[in-house]
Image (tube, rainbow, N blue to C red):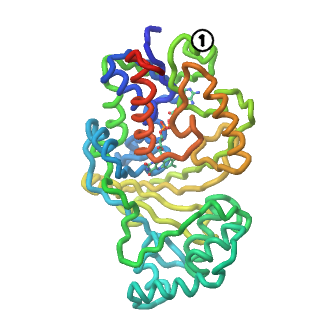
Amino acid sequence: MNADLVVVGAGFFGLTIAERAASDLGLKVLVIDRRDHIGGNAYSERDAETGIEVHKYGAHLFHTSNERVWEYVNRFTTFTDYVHKVYGVHNGEVYSLPINLATINQFFRANLTPDEARTLIREQAGELAGSDPQNLNDKGIQLIGRPLYEAFIKHYTGKQWQTDPKDLPAGIISRLPVRYTYDNRYFNDTYEGLPTDGYTVWIERMADHPHITVQLDTDFFDESQPLNKRALVGTVPIIYTGPVDRYFDYAEGELSWRTIDFEQEILDTGDFQGTSVVNYNDADTPFTRIIEPRHFHPERKYQTEKTLIMREFSRFAESGDEPYYPVNTADDRQKMLAYRDLAKAEEAVLFGGRLGTYKYLDMHMAIGSALTMYDNKIKPHFSGGAP
Ligand code: FAD
């Protein structure tokens, strides 16, 4: 092996580090990933039957207000003018989300002005005003009042967590946004869009550098192949973006995650739901939402009479499942403190990304934190400064 730096994990975090180290410092970088493709969870591919681009690990919408990240990602891709909007089914009717004036007026069969709607929601939230909610259910009622909470939050959250919100900690939510305008843009960020040629083309361009070598199907913990932890640690600087508990052989116990099961179906219709994402807010529907990926790229005008949909079912991850969202219980936080100490003591290995830090990170956050790690740790180290 002839590398100055090894990156474990070819997701956005790992590839941002690799790209900067190769392009800016001229380092030879070896990137390994246990999967058979690059891109981590942002990977997408064209469905063989319909040609529609499918985000294999769940819908990925790019958005950021970080100028540096926006400038950086635009080096590799242009973005479409896609603006994300979400609709939700409750009681057989479709509503606009996040809760806004259209949702409120439709739900209460009213024609309220912003001030009237504000007063109504304040009155309804007054049911638990001044109390100290001990669970998510009471917190939700206190934030937006019982009617809207029970229609749009209670069962959706219960399905996401496989737990009755009365048994979930109040701390999971600090606020529930209610907009007193008809603005139903899902994100508030300055920049938003989808990569024009798809996520995989974007990600391939990041890795396309003569000093970057990517080796797939290579598990860092598999000692039957040469690029493993035991062989590499201490011989070359390593950026590790896999699960932090796995790195330390679960010495402090396993961290808990939620995962999603995707049920994919191809239908004999050109359009199933008229939009990309519809949430199912009621308890009697077992899935949380349906994604119809063709609507992410209306500009492509897919030439197919069929469409593809993905139903999402959320549950706690078991061993072998893809870890998607940190559960982050008090017990997890305690374990994470111990893992952080172990990680600090691990010389010549830096931990990053969502699995390496046990944090939910949007793509722009993963890229932003990789750029910061590059500036603060990697560049000074290789330029002769302090690591
Ligand atoms: P990852 O993408 O997870 O990459 C880590 C890589 O490490 C993986 O490729 C993995 O195979 C590899 N690896 C792990 N262990 C090993 C090992 N032992 N050996 C070798 N390789 C290993 N962000 C948004 O901005 N917008 C969205 O709409 C959005 N939607 C999301 C929906 C879902 C369901 C999920 C789960 C995430 C979503 N995200 C979204 C977040 C986005 O996926 C992350 O920001 C991004 O994946 C973080 O990149 P990363 O490099 O830290 O991690």
Looking at the image, which residue is at 51% across and 88% down? 120
Observer-nearest residue: 320 or 340? Answer: 340
Q: Secondary structure at mark 1?
A: helix
Residue 269 seen from this side: no
The reply, left or right, for residue 334 in relation to residue 1 is right
Residue 374 seen from this side: yes
Looking at the image, which residue is at 60% across and 34% down? 243
Amino acid type of the residue tagged 1 in the rendering: Ala
Question: Can you tell me whether the CB of the residue at mark 1 lies under 8 Å from the nearest atom of ligand 1?
Answer: no
Observer-nearest residue: 356 or 194? Answer: 356
* Vertical position of residue 383 compared to residue 144: above or below: above
The reply, left or right, for residue 246 in relation to residue 362 is right
Looking at the image, which residue is at 58% across and 19% down? 347
**Residue 4 image position (x, y, % from top left):** 43, 13
State the image quarter where residue 78 is shown: top left
Count up the numbered dots: 1
Label 1 neighbour load within 10 Å: few <14, some 14-19, many 20+? some
**Residue 94 image position (x, y, % from top left):** 46, 75
Q: Which residue is mark 1?
A: 231
Taking the view exactly as shown, the residue that stands out farthest to the top is 2
Looking at the image, which residue is at 50% across and 65% down? 279
The reply, left or right, for residue 274 in relation to residue 348 is left
Observer-nearest residue: 302 or 290? Answer: 290
* Vertical position of residue 214 compared to residue 80: above or below: above
**Residue 230 image position (x, y, % from top left):** 63, 14
**Residue 205 image position (x, y, % from top left):** 31, 31
Taking the view exactly as shown, the residue that stands out farthest to the front is 386
